[in-house]
Amino acid sequence: MTATEATVTSTTDPATEACHGAPETPGAAGPHGYSKQKDQHLKRLRRIEGQIRGLQRMVEEDVYCIDILTQVSASTKALQSFALQLLQEHLRHCVAQAAVQGGDEIDAKVAEASAAIARLLRT
């Protein structure tokens, strides 16, 4: 992933507005598909963060490379699982809401989701 892909920016794209309404201030947005489970997501991300810190410790302590690679694999799978759950929530909430609204928003949301899936597959 490049730095550009990792950068999160706010947008007033009609497809984004279909998901959570036009932001009142830059970066402020309404509820997203993941909002109902935000605490669970944060807990999960903190767990993943702990796995990454564990990797740092393993390198600092000169742990056997295969053991580190095993932990890298587990961390990668945890992030992929999180990404898939977030994508599912996006489809259920944002894409479904755009479909109900009709118009060009649904095409934009499907294109946005397809691009996200393509990025996930490249990793």
Image: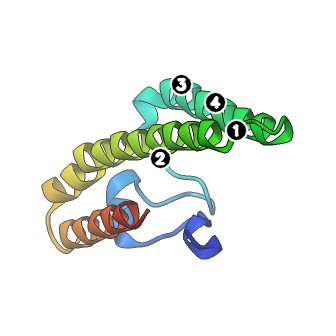
Whether residue 32 is visible to the viewer of this picture, yes or no, is: no
Q: Nearer the viewer, mark 3 or mark 2?
A: 3
Whether residue 117 is visible to the viewer of this picture, yes or no, is: yes
Q: Which residue does the numbered mark 4 point to in the structure image? A: 46
Q: Residue at x 48, y 70 (%)?
A: 12
Q: Which residue does the numbered mark 2 point to in the structure image? A: 30
Q: Nearer the viewer, mark 3 or mark 4?
A: 4
Amino acid type, label 4: Arg
Q: Earlier in the sequence, mark 1 or mark 4?
A: 4
Q: Nearer the viewer, mark 4 or mark 2?
A: 4
Q: Which residue does the numbered mark 3 point to in the structure image? A: 39
- Give neighbour class at mark 2: few <14, some 14-19, many 20+ (Cα, 10 Å): few
Q: Horizontal and vertical percent for residue 72?
A: 57, 43
Q: CA distance from mark 2 to mark 1?
A: 47 Å
Amino acid type, label 1: Tyr
Q: Residue at x 49, y 43 (%)?
A: 79
Residue 111: image quadrant is: bottom left
- Give neighbour class at mark 1: few <14, some 14-19, many 20+ (Cα, 10 Å): few
Q: Nearer the viewer, mark 2 or mark 1?
A: 1
- Give neighbour class at mark 3: few <14, some 14-19, many 20+ (Cα, 10 Å): few
Which of 62 and 98 lies nearest the eye of the viewer?
62
Q: Earlier in the sequence, mark 3 or mark 2?
A: 2
For this orientation, the residue located farthest to the right is 60
Q: Is residue 53 above or below residue 107?
A: above
Marks 4 & 2, CB-CB < 8 Å contact: no
Q: CA distance from mark 4 to mark 2?
A: 24 Å
Label drawn at residue 64: 1
The local secondary structure at tag 3 comes to helix
The local secondary structure at tag 2 comes to loop
Q: Earlier in the sequence, mark 3 or mark 1?
A: 3
